[in-house]
Image (cartoon, rainbow, N blue to C red):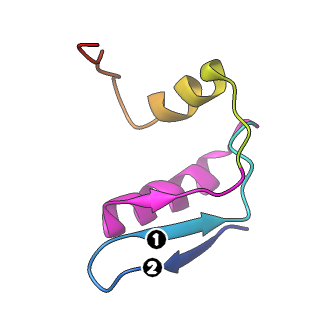
Amino acid sequence: MITVNRIGRHLGAEISGVDLSRPLDDDTFSQISRAFFDNEVVFFRNQKLTPEQQIAFTRRFGVLEQHVR
């Protein structure tokens, strides 16, 4: 079970209770997605992800964009 702790009055939350290096079930991802869209900025502390794991997680939000650099 994840925990969402609002950080700011208008913006930001810390999400804990999840290991982003592991595959996420749809319900857990739905909670993360809802927290992201509700708070606009979310933080996950102490995560150890490979670049491939980070890409796999962020792809669940939609098509990734290439940065110009």
Does the stretch in magenta take in 36? yes
Residue 60 in the figure: left or right of residue 66:
right
Q: Residues within 10 Å of mark 1 (few under 14, many from 20)?
A: many
Q: CA distance from mark 2 to mark 1?
A: 5 Å
Are the residues flagged by discs 2 and 1 in contact, CB closer than 8 Å? yes
Secondary structure under tag 1 reads strand
Q: Earlier in the sequence, mark 2 or mark 1?
A: 2
Residue 42 in the figure: left or right of residue 28:
left
Q: Position of residue 51 (x, y in %)?
A: 61, 21
- The magenta segment is 22-46
Residue picked out by circle 1: 13
Front one among 13 and 32: 13
User: Looking at the rendering, which quadrant does residue 63 occupy?
Assistant: top left
User: Looking at the rendering, which quadrant does residue 35 occupy?
Assistant: bottom left
Relative to residue 36, is residue 64 depicted above or below?
A: above
The residue at the point 46 percent across, 28 percent down is 59
Residue picked out by circle 2: 7
Does the stretch in magenta take in 48? no
The residue at the point 46 percent across, 71 percent down is 13
Q: Amino acid at mark 2?
A: Ile
Q: Residues within 10 Å of mark 2 (few under 14, many from 20)?
A: some
Q: Position of residue 64 (x, y in %)?
A: 35, 22
The residue at the point 54 percent across, 68 percent down is 14
Q: Amino acid at mark 1?
A: Ala
Q: Quadrant of the N terminus?
A: bottom right
The residue at the point 45 percent across, 60 percent down is 42
Relative to residue 62, is residue 27 depicted above or below?
A: below
Q: Position of residue 40 (x, y in %)?
A: 31, 61
Q: How many marks?
A: 2
Relative to residue 32, is residue 7 depicted above or below?
A: below
User: Looking at the rendering, which quadrant does residue 41 occupy?
Assistant: bottom left
